[in-house]
Image: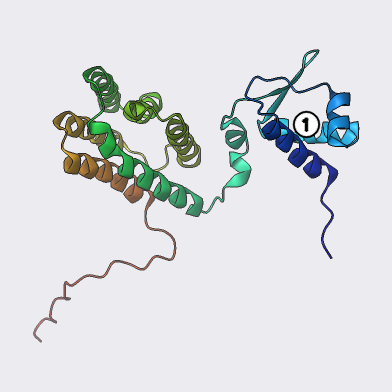
Amino acid sequence: MTARVPAYRQAQVAIKRYIEDHGLKPGDLLPPEAQLARDMGMSRLSLREGVKSLEALGILEAKQGEGIYVKAFTFDSIFENLPYSFATDGKSLRDLLQVRTALEEGLIGMVAGRATPEQLDHLERLARQMLQKAQAGETFEDEDREFHLALYEPLQNLFLNRLVELFWEVFRRLHGSANVTAWHLEQTAHDHLAILNALRARDHQRITEAMHAHFQQIHARLGPQPGTPPPVTDILPPPPANP
């Protein structure tokens, strides 16, 4: 027996289809509630429930005294639900880092031929600020976040920028400053300088290696995944001492 679809879910689907069919864009105003309910063949109560759920998802925005607007996409609703969306055993953190590593390592080579001298200078200022703070024993989350966002600006890919920002923010919230020492801070700053210097040299292999080394340090800081067997070694144990 097929489960009955809740009214608010039916309303969600109908509203999204209405937006698509009428070519509505962010900032466009939907028709008044009574007209919209009539056009979609549903009660005003079901429509309100659908609107509220789509507001929570960041798709619609209701303004008092004005009406209901189509909202520009953001990751805000994802950020708000992070504490309820990720496991606390560390697996989600490692999974996320794996995806983020693949994304940034895979795209960093494209930046080399497109970054302007001004963009590289901006990255250098950020990396130098990170190093100064690290040497003073201070964290540098703001500079780190801005560095990774500015890094992909030359690609002019808004969706990529949002993904990088999302991954960075989620990782920061899940990981925080766990296992971060003064040595890690300084090494992280040097990692960013190495990425910058490789970009200035426009050496694609060196760029990829620098980004890989940066993420390897983060992976190492998280430690091995629970249940992972110890690495195999070819070193034989010393022979027993002669009696």
- Residue at (36% x, 31% y) in the render: 148
Above or below, comparing residue 92 to residue 30 in the picture: below
Task: Locate the N terminus and report the quarter of the image it occupies.
Answer: bottom right
Looking at the image, the residue that sits furthest to the top is: 65
Question: Along the line of sight, which residue is nearer the eye, 90 or 47?
Answer: 47
In the rendering, at what x and y percent does residue 6 appear? 83, 47
Task: Locate the C terminus and report the quarter of the image it occupies.
Answer: bottom left
Q: Is residue 25 visible?
A: yes
- Residue at (60% x, 41% y) in the render: 83
Badge 1 density bin: few <14, some 14–19, many ≥20, Cα 10 Å: many
Question: Along the line of sight, which residue is nearer the eye, 46 or 166?
Answer: 46
Question: Along the line of sight, which residue is nearer the eye, 181 or 45?
Answer: 45
Above or below, comparing residue 143 to residue 41 in the picture: above
What SS does tag 1 mark?
A: helix
Above or below, comparing residue 44 to residue 10 in the picture: above
Q: Find residue 226 and report its image quarter.
A: bottom left
Above or below, comparing residue 242 to residue 95 in the picture: below
- Residue at (46% x, 36% y) in the render: 163
Residue under pointer 1: 51
Instruction: State left or right for residue 178 relative to residue 211.
Output: right
In the rendering, at what x and y percent does residue 35 appear? 86, 25
Tell me which colouring the rendered structure shows: rainbow
Instruction: State left or right for residue 116 relative to residue 87.
Output: left
Q: Is residue 139 visible?
A: no
In the rendering, at what x and y percent does residue 210 appear? 22, 41
Q: How many marks?
A: 1
For the residue marked with disc 1, what is the amino acid? Val
Instruction: State left or right for residue 222 relative to residue 192.
Output: right
Looking at the image, the residue that sits furthest to the bottom is: 243
